[in-house]
Amino acid sequence: MNLLITLPVVVAGVIYLIRKQREYTWGWVKNNSSLKDKVFIITGANCGLGFQTAKALAKRGATVVLACRDLIKANEAIANIKLEVTDAKLTALPLDLEVFDSIKSFCRDISREFPQFDCIINNAGLSIKTPFETDEGIEVHVAANHLGHFLMVNLLLDLIKKNNARVVIVSSNLHEKGKINLENFWKLVDTKHPKQLYANSKLMNSYFAKELYKKGIDVHVCSPGLCYTDLYRDYNIKFYHLIAFSPVILLFLRSAEQGAQSIIYCATDNENDEEKNPNNSYIVRDLRQSKSKIKLDDDISDKLWKESMRLCKLD
């Protein structure tokens, strides 16, 4: 009987220690220097990684603009942060990355209210089980994860250059599984494998960063790793899925706060150089530069940029 009690306790203790050791190796931003008078713009900041990033930056005195589709949820996020950071300087502005007019309106708001900013964090993203085309005729993963941010950054590009502002692009390891068909990359052509559409959009993120870097922009790419957020809320994950994937959860699943560390690091501390830059590497969960398993093709990069410009009517 004692063995029946002792064995589960020992196993639970071992699992706990393994988990804690894993968390320790993932890396945490140690720099707590003041960010007073600095302005950070974060898309999708009302929950998950964006929320944790906003809170961490606010703790250090930064002014944070939460760019969100749902202003009610954005203001609820601000209220929650202020429970912990009473003097936080936070502002919510409406932004729907699936709607070009919303993006243009948001950029006008930024130009008027926050013309001097220090960093734009392209964090918002989605992965859904039943993809669709937006009113602009763009497959929703491409719209929200790539073209929306592409249009926003390009509309603010003069201010980015003037302010020498950083651009942070939150990507994913899944970009290595992405494929880009330049003939119709924005169209909904495959509903059988929606996760492939997500991977494709993450590969577009990497190419977007590559081109921005070539244009002299201080751009940083990160992959927060597998995190417990509502990114996959559309997949209706059941308890038995959690049981089946418990080894993966134990070894790889991070909290939103842990996942946000790579974003915070890119927004504040990371430095590019000739060896380590968005052309061939990105920041991973333990805050180190990692080489991508795929080589970004210069021809695809150039053509994707031009086609994205055409779709956004920027050419």
Image (tube, grey):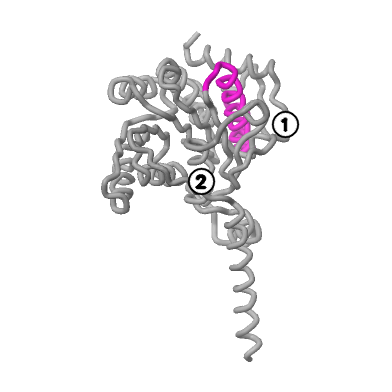
Q: Amino acid at mark 2?
A: Gln
Q: Residue at x 50, y 47 (%)?
A: 29
Residue under numbered circle 2:
261
On the picture, is 184 further left or further right than 315?
A: right
Q: Quadrant of residue 196?
A: top right
The secondary structure type at the circle numbered 1 is: loop
As drawn, 303 above or below 60:
above
Q: Assign the N terminus to one quadrant of the image.
A: bottom right
Q: Which mark is residue 294?
A: 1
Which of 60 and 168 lies nearest the eye of the viewer? 60
Mark with earlier residue (1, 2): 2
Q: Residue at x 51, y 15 (%)?
A: 311
Q: Residue at x 54, y 49 (%)?
A: 227
On the picture, is 24 further left or further right than 72?
A: right
Q: Please tell me how crowded label 1 is: few (under 14), some (14-19), or many (20+) other residues with Cα within 10 Å.
A: few
Q: Amino acid at mark 1?
A: Ile
In the image, residue 160 lies at what x, y percent? 43, 21
Residue range in magenta is 188-217
As drawn, 216 above or below 249:
above
In the image, residue 80 lies at what x, y percent? 31, 50
The secondary structure type at the circle numbered 2 is: helix
Q: Is residue 57 magenta?
A: no
Return the residue found at the far bottom.
1
